[in-house]
Image: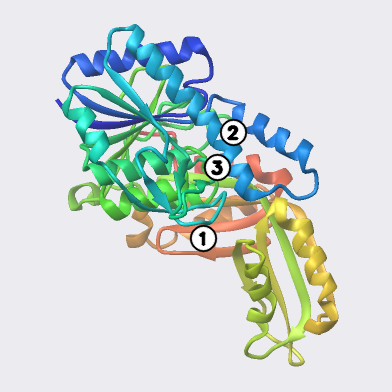
Amino acid sequence: MAFLVKKYGGTSVGTIERIQHVAGSLKEAHEAGDQIVVVVSAMSGETNRLVGLAREVQPAVVDVRELDVLLATGEQVTIALLTMALKELGVEACSYTGAQIKILTDDSHSKARIISIDTDRIMDDINAGKIVVVAGFQGVDEKGNITTLGRGGSDTSAVALGAALKCDECQIFTDVDGVYTTDPRVESRARRLERITFEEMLEMASLGSKVLQIRAVEFAGKYNVPLRVLSSFKPGEGTLITYDDEENSMEQALVSGIAFNRDEAQVTVTGVADQPGTAFAILGPISDLNIEVDMIIQNIGADETTDFTFTVHRDEYSRVIDFLQSRQKELGAASITGNDRIAKLSIVGVGMRSHAGIASRMFRSLSDSGINMRLITTSEIKISVVIDEKYLELGVRALHEEFELAAP
């Protein structure tokens, strides 16, 4: 008997048949004695359909408050259908929107952050022997406005509920059966990991691995919520994400996985003054536009000038280039250039902490494959490089072989 939060993504509840399959699985777990809170996403494709409708009505700029009201309906459909399916199987269940159980967030529409969750109503139902079905991805601010947590926000909803309810485990059901050493669609020999640390998963999520939303991993690590990634369609143990311990650290592989991100674009500002405040003059206004900057490199100054390079999401590339070019004279820059056909390739592993030479092996492997590195950044457990997008899959396979990730 365990207290579990189970989250099902859009593909897991994408059709009536799949919703009924989920209901059957939940009935089995419930009859085995588990106490269950279910968090669901909108049916696959529904969020994109709703966004499309909004853009038909407001082609230029969509009103973010009203967009949140619209998008929140996707999960509302799913919670009602799943609860009906459970009741059809004779299981007592009750559905709730984010507002009904008071998932309180800030007022940042489309990117809201959870402040608190009122668990009284949920626990009353759990103690009454019911399965509770909650709409993921959404909440409500202090003024009662519906808010959403951003793409993948249902993962965050599930982990936040797990933390608030002090569950035994938060299980994320998706269309893959765990976390792999890299994307199996790129490297067929990729291997499922039995366990991975919060640190490693956080890095992999931030570097482009789309198995889990980064904020969900942050939340799980902060509140020590054991997280497990499982398949809705294939039985198995999945991958457990938890804190590292000394015993596991001794046997930790040097590199646990290879992550990559195709959604990167590079921007270079050349010939700016090599003096304090230059970086802020460039990046401060970009931050004010709510645009996230990833990798940042500043060259060594020459003739009292320097070049400044950074990466942003590819969707923001044109906006950043246009903005900086409009301020080129103010910045005193010689040129504003960029490249939106790059990719970020990274190796991740807590085992890198205690072993030297990992970077040189990575660089040699890429060099032997004829791949040039444009930018390089490192941290305690990761090394990331920016390369031309056309070489990405070649680079992934080369590094997977170099660090012998196909071997158990």
| Above or below, 342 relative to 336 | above
| Circle nearer the N terminus (2, 1) | 2
Residue 81 shows up from this direction: yes
Of residues 89 and 315, the one nearer the viewer is: 89
Which corner quadrant holds the C terminus? Answer: top left
Residue 243 in the image, given as x and y percentages of width and height: 26, 50
Residue 290, percent from left and from top: 63, 62
Neighbours of disc 3 within 10 Å: few (<14), some (14-19), many (20+): few
* Numbered circle sitting on residue 151: 3
- Coordinates of residue 256 in the picture (x, y in percent): 40, 45
**Cα–Cα span, label 2 and label 1:** 23 Å
Which sits earlier in the primary sequence, circle 2 or circle 3?
3
**Residue at image coords 51%, 24%:** 77
Which mark lies nearer to you, 2 or 1? 2
Establish if 143 lies above or below 164: below
| Circle number at residue 186 | 2
Count numbered badges in the picture: 3
- Colour scheme: rainbow
